[in-house]
Image (cartoon, rainbow, N blue to C red):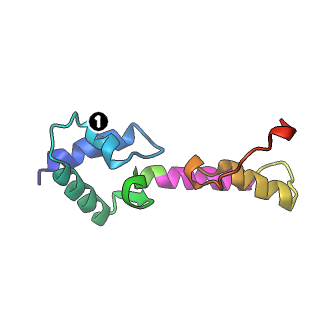
């Protein structure tokens, strides 16, 4: 496995702080690499501690460790808001700040719309 592939993957992940799926990464590399090479490189980057993942199988998203740290610092900033929030408001704020895929799915009642 070449170090060049790892660097290409890291550059692709830097451009997307929210993370990318393996298919998105492969697309960013213009499909010039074998899919198994990309998987092996991602596993190696994870073992090196440079990349973390969330989710399983096709829903798995890879992010740079630096992007994760930045997201966590943003979360603590929201928690130390200057406005005093009730426990219900803090709970609602946490729910809104979750990534879309991590939120609880809801349905709408047409009578309320």
- Name the residue at 18% across, 54% down: 36
Secondary element under disc 1, as helix, strand or loop, is helix
Q: Considering only vertical position in the picture, is 96 above or below 54?
A: above
Give the quarter of the image for residue 47.
Answer: bottom left
Q: Is residue 112 left or right of residue 63?
A: right
The x and y percentages for residue 43 are 26, 61
Q: Does 69 lie within the magenta span?
A: yes
Note whether 88 is above or below 34 in the view shown.
below
The quadrant of the rendering that contains the C terminus is: top right
Residue visible at 27% across and 45% down in the picture? 9
Query: Where residue 1 appears, x then y in whole percent?
Result: 11, 54
Decide if residue 61 is on the left or right side of residue 90. Answer: left
From this view, report whether residue 15 is shown above or below residue 22.
above
For image coordinates 70% across by 50% down, the residue present is: 106
Q: Is residue 85 magenta?
A: no
Query: What secondary structure prevails in the magenta region?
Result: helix
What are the residue bounds of the magenta stretch? 68-80
Q: Which residue lies furthest to the bottom in this view?
A: 47
Asked whether, in this view, residue 24 is left or right of residue 101, the answer is left
Whole-percent x, y for residue 83 in the image: 84, 48
Report the residue marked by disc 1.
Answer: 28
């Amino acid at each position: 496995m070449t170090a060049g592939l790892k660097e290409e993957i890291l550059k692709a992940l830097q451009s997307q702080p929210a993370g990318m799926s393996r298919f998105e990464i492969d697309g960013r590399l213009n499909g010039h690499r074998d899919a198994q090479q990309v998987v092996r490189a991602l596993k190696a980057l994870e073992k090196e501690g440079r990349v973390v993942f969330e989710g399983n199988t096709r829903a798995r998203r890879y992010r740079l460790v630096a992007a994760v740290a930045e997201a966590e610092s943003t979360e603590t900033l929201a928690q130390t808001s200057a406005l005093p929030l009730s426990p219900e408001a803090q709970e609602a704020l946490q729910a809104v700040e979750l990534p879309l895929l991590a939120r609880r799915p809801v349905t709408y009642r047409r009578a309320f719309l």
